[in-house]
């Protein structure tokens, strides 16, 4: 989570300094200098290769026995701080993961490839793994009643939407995000 927070802070500083006019972030800014509008939500899915799902006994076993059945499995992530896994564990299991990253991949597409190859389990945005789920390349290891979401925000400096070109861009992005 440190990396995402740092990136958002850099964006906020750039907005405040006037280096750019709009930013899309996963962090809501604090204070009154910047304003944020929720743009879209991204659903996250806990996935593994079919062999991991079979070894666990399926999603029903994970649901019934809880997080303990996952603790011995290797984890694939984009950062050693485990931002996606940590967020998922907090939302679904109300706990922190005990595992460390067995494989740290350069981006989420690489996480999907590593998970599909059987390197471990991972947490991915649904849009990224939907096709792999449909083809059986990966399996959802749990289907919680309320899936964890990450909200994206469209952030601007307070008062800048009075400028017509920025207001149009802001409105266009809000309308476009409905289909994301």
Image (spheres, rainbow, N blue to C red):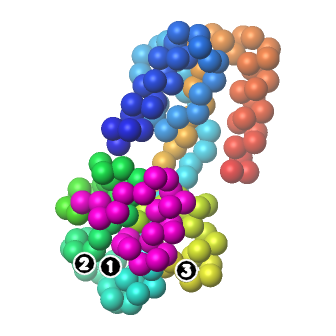
Query: Residue 151: horizontal and vertical position, in percent?
Result: 52, 44
Q: How many marks?
A: 3
Circles 1 and 2 in contact, beta carbons < 8 Å = yes
Quadrant of the frame with the N terminus: top left
Q: Which residue is mark 3?
A: 137
Dot placed on the residue nearer the N-terminal end, 1 or 2:
1
Question: Which numbered disc covers residue 69?
Answer: 2
Question: Which numbered disc covers residue 62?
Answer: 1
67 lies above or below 57: above
Image quarter of residue 100: bottom left
Label 3: element kind: loop
Query: Residue 124: horizontal and vertical position, in percent?
Result: 48, 61
Per the image, is 118 magenta?
A: yes
Query: Residue 62: horizontal and vertical position, in percent?
Result: 32, 79
Residue at x-position 80% and y-position 14%: 164
Label 2: element kind: helix
14 lies above or below 139: above
Per the image, is 75 magenta?
A: no
Residue at x-position 56% and y-position 48%: 41
Image quarter of residue 146: bottom left
Residue 89: in sight, yes or no? no
**CA separation, marks 1 and 2?**
6 Å
Image quarter of residue 77: bottom left
Question: What range is drawn magenta here?
Answer: 100-121
Is residue 88 toward the left or the right of residue 44 in the image?
Answer: left
Residue at x-position 55% and y-position 40%: 152
């Amino acid at each position: 989570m440190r990396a995402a927070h740092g990136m958002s802070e850099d964006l906020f500083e750039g907005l405040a300094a006037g280096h750019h006019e709009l930013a899309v972030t996963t962090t809501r800014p604090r204070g009154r200098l910047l304003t944020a509008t929720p743009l879209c939500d991204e659903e996250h899915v806990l996935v593994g290769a079919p062999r991991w799902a079979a070894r666990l006994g399926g999603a029903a076993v994970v649901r019934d026995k809880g997080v303990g059945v996952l603790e011995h499995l290797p984890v694939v992530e984009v950062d050693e701080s485990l931002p996606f896994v940590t967020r998922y564990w907090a939302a679904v299991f109300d706990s922190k993961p005990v595992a460390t990253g067995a494989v740290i991949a350069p981006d989420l597409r690489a996480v999907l490839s590593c998970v599909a190859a059987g390197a471990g389990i991972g947490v991915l945005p649904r849009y990224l793994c939907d096709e792999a789920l449909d083809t059986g390349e990966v399996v959802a290891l749990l289907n919680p009643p309320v899936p964890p979401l990450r909200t994206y925000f469209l952030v601007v400096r307070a008062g800048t939407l009075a400028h017509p070109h920025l207001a149009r861009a802001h409105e266009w992005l809000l309308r476009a995000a409905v289909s994301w």
